[in-house]
Amino acid sequence: MTESVKNTLLFVVVAGLILLSGFTQSWNTAILILNMGLISAIMAIGVNLQWGFAGLFNVGVMGFVALGGLAVVLVSTPPTPGAWSSGGYGIVLSLLLGAATVVACVLVAQKLPKGRVQTLSIIGILVVGFFIYRAVFDPSAAAVEAINPAVAGNLGGLNFCTEARYCGWLVVLAWFAGGLLAAGAAWLIGKTALGLRSDYLAIATLGIAEIIIAIMKNEDWLARGVKNVYGIPRPYPVVGYEVELQNDPGFLTRADWFGLDPVTASTLSVKLGYSLLFTIVLLALLWMAQMALKSPWGRMMRAIRDNEVAAEAMGKDVTRRHLQIFVLGSAICGIAGAMMTTLDGQLTPGTYNPLRFTFLVWVMVIVGGSGNNFGAVLGAFLIWFLWIQVEPIGLWLMNLITLGLPDGSALKSHLIDSAAHMRLFTMGLILLIVLRFSPRGLIPEK
């Protein structure tokens, strides 16, 4: 069997598993797995760029995904009435003052010779800047958060349009804004952390990701914190609204052709609209990643990954290239995070946890094949399918195993209650099996 045939069969098997869940469970479940698989594949491509191309161990994926979701709120939602006049401009001014304080400290560190004068000057600037910042920021943030806190209490976004067909395309624009926001954060992180050794880089990126999540949870003026932001617009008209579809006679006629009731048909139509947009974005990013891999730039990145000393001896700026690919990979993760927030229709900072948005994406890349973009995509679909389906399969298996035990048995209750933990067990088992029998992944790098 040739390599291309084997790889094609692997994708066919995963597609068959998703179709099987549609036939045996529901098409809503199957399309949900497909949509989240598409988003996960984009995340996996971003991580594969960083690790597979350059060997950068980034475990702060969760932070960049969250920044992508935040960008959707800041770009595609309407502004909160009265928020900017009451305290919005004060918040912006305080942030500028904080940035000016940091810049002043950097200039002092560069201009003054090292010694007591330099140290005291930096401490003085930080102390004065901190009190000025808090004097401006605290009342401004309190004023914004006091505006109808039950449904608002934040600045809102930049969506000033009134027609749905134009507002919908603003949501798609917000996806790329999410990539830019994540890229900007990655540039700041990379300038300070990329000089660290791989294990210290992992610790630094994880810590920074946790800081980003903590800010999103606690700063209500930004995106309502743990109170969440609901009602995020959809990319209309590609993705419509169920109520509009159910009132459309033409759509009801087409639903009758397929033997579907209006509610089910409208739900499937909306999810398939998301699938179309997500597929377009995934194919575009996959094509660009493949072109980058085959280009001289891609060969240079792999040379740096394999031997930094030799690449640097050949005149390559290793630190600059690491920063470049760190920013690119993080931007792709930001786009995926923005797409996921749009799919959910809400921003919920409490759901961003390392287990789902860091560990799971790394498992996708390792199982699929580090350094191979198609392997990362395959791993994303396979692992996400298992993440969704293992729990119901585990419950069925435990019920089958305990079929002969009496209903009041403590062992039976324990085994059935433990079915929820089958997800983690299965992820670890699959990772061990792949590392044992195919350590380079299902579709290894050439």
Image (tube, rainbow, N blue to C red):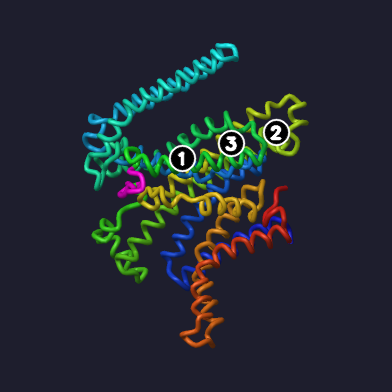
Dot 3: what SS? helix
In this rendered view, identify the residue nearer to me: 238 or 222: 222
Residue that carries the numbered disc 1 in the rendered image: 212
User: Which comes sooner in the sequence, label 3 or label 2?
Assistant: 2
Q: Residue 300 carries which label?
A: 2
- Segment colored magenta: 224-235
Q: Is residue 345 magenta?
A: no
Report the residue at 53% width, 86% height from top: 405
In this rendered view, identify the residue nearer to me: 91 or 48: 91
Report the residue at 40% width, 42% height from top: 216
Looking at the image, residue 332 sits to the left or right of residue 157; the answer is: right
Q: In which quarter of the image is residue 167?
A: top left
Looking at the image, residue 240 sits to the left or right of residue 429; the answer is: left
Estimate the spatial distance between the alpha carbons at disc 1 and disc 3, rounded to whole Å.
17 Å
Residue 156 in the image, given as x and y percentages of width and height:
30, 38
Residue that carries the numbered disc 3 in the rendered image: 326
User: Which comes sooner in the sequence, label 1 or label 2?
Assistant: 1
Looking at the image, residue 10 sits to the left or right of residue 387; the answer is: right
Residue 223 in the image, given as x and y percentages of width and height:
34, 41
Q: What residue type is labelled 3?
A: Phe
Residue 306 in the image, given as x and y percentages of width and height:
74, 39
In this rendered view, identify the residue nearer to me: 100 or 1: 100
